[in-house]
Image (cartoon, rainbow, N blue to C red):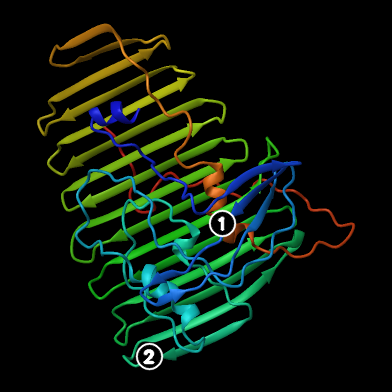
Amino acid sequence: MAAAAASRGFTTPFNLRLRGADVAALNDKNGVLEVRRKKRRLLTSDWGVVKCCCSDSVVPIRMATGSGKSVEKCEEWRFDMKKSPNYRVRAPAMPFASPQPRFVSKDKFFSRCSPRNSGPQSRDSPPKRDTGIANEKDWGISLLNENVIESGTSEDGSTWYRESGEDLGENGYRCRWTRMGGQSHNGTSEWKETWWEKSDWTGYKELGVEKSGRNAEGDSWWETWREVLHQDEWSNLARIERSAQKQAKSGTENAGWYENWWEKYDAKGWTEKGAHKYGRLNEQSWWEKWGEHYDGRGSVLKWTDKWAETELGTKWGDKWEEKFFAGIGSRQGETWHVSPSDERWSRTWGEEHFGNGKVHKYGKSTTGESWDIVVDEETYYEADPHYGWADVVGDSTQLLSIQPRERPHGIYPSLDFGSTPSPTDEPPDESFSSE
């Protein structure tokens, strides 16, 4: 599909790859998936050398039950500063989008490489656009083991605070959290962060972050990231779900953007991925939605729909869809344009792949062109996701190592499968609209 899609002006929505150094083997023993992680070497960063003490460790995931004992959590953290390729939209770049946020490099190590009583450093950079869902290692989530309430003033006059605690509830619910934030000496910039991990007796585990802020230029932003492990209601399999929402607004222009990303995986290979995006730069606005669905048995559905418009009334867009199974399937799409005087143009096209080397291609446009032919052509499509169950398990060691409360003997959890809400489809401040 990648070659065919590229010829029509599309890029493959997701292109994440499993790092070979992360996962040595994936075995299924008595209903338990085991991921063996290779020994890490010394990693360097702008803070110097960070040593990892983790040798071969086994992370078990129960396939038929939502519970199961977690492995011991490694005392020192592993870091991987490499980034996976990103799916980017051909849309105007935000003029206020900053370079790599400071907390991804220096501040990521701050809470572990500095005395605890020193204040957290300011994170006053907006998130980057079109970066998808970051891995948990890129977030550097570090929760304090004791209840803390701290605040102070830095040398430059900025103020900061840091709090941590633990909330307990029914059914073995446990939430460990850390909050921190601060503002400049004159109040023109401020930032807030909340990190958390949750668990209960059903085997549910969650890791998450929420960040927000504004800077002296008037740029404001908000983002959240969640990673969840739970037992699927229907298949009774372990499932991992990840999601991210981000938005930012310019303080100097009529510009801003919003993104909602989600990924869902289960232990049998079922995978779903998607994103909804919106952006605006002065007189131009654009939208994009795309999705991928793999059933784990060779059937795949992919689709994309993106469009844009200007305040003068010009509108244009592209959309396509493909469905395949065992080499048999179809592709179809449309490109369209509307002028300020309401003149409309569109071209539709389609392909039927019969699995025998024959492809029926057809299409037409509003200018009178048309075609309807059968050609000899090899069918290419991707029946498996670039990034699947083994990949997400290998990248979720902190999620899997969350320690739930000990369940008393004779107490059984009341299962509640409605605890993972579906991601919202609409941005909080702007509504999607199509032609």
Image point (70%, 59%), residue name: 70
Which image quadrant for residue 174? Answer: bottom right
Q: Is residue 97 above or below residue 46?
A: above
Image point (56%, 55%), residue name: 396
Between 74 and 259, the residue placed more toward the observer is: 74
Q: Residues within 10 Å of mark 1 (few under 14, many from 20)?
A: some
Q: Position of residue 141 (x, y in %)?
A: 51, 68
Badge 2 amino acid:
Ser
Report the residue marked by disc 2.
Answer: 154
Q: Closer to us: mark 1 or mark 2?
A: 1
> Does the residue at mark 1 contact the one at mark 2 (Cβ under 8 Å)?
no
Q: Position of residue 107 (x, y in %)?
A: 40, 75
Report the residue marked by disc 1.
Answer: 38
The image quadrant where one finds the C terminus is top left
Q: Is residue 208 above or below residue 367?
A: below
The image quadrant where one finds the N terminus is top left
Camera sees residue 387? yes
Badge 1 amino acid:
Lys
Image point (19%, 49%), residue name: 92
Circle 2 SS class: loop
User: Residue 262 vs residue 350: left or right?
Assistant: right
Image point (52%, 54%), residue name: 22
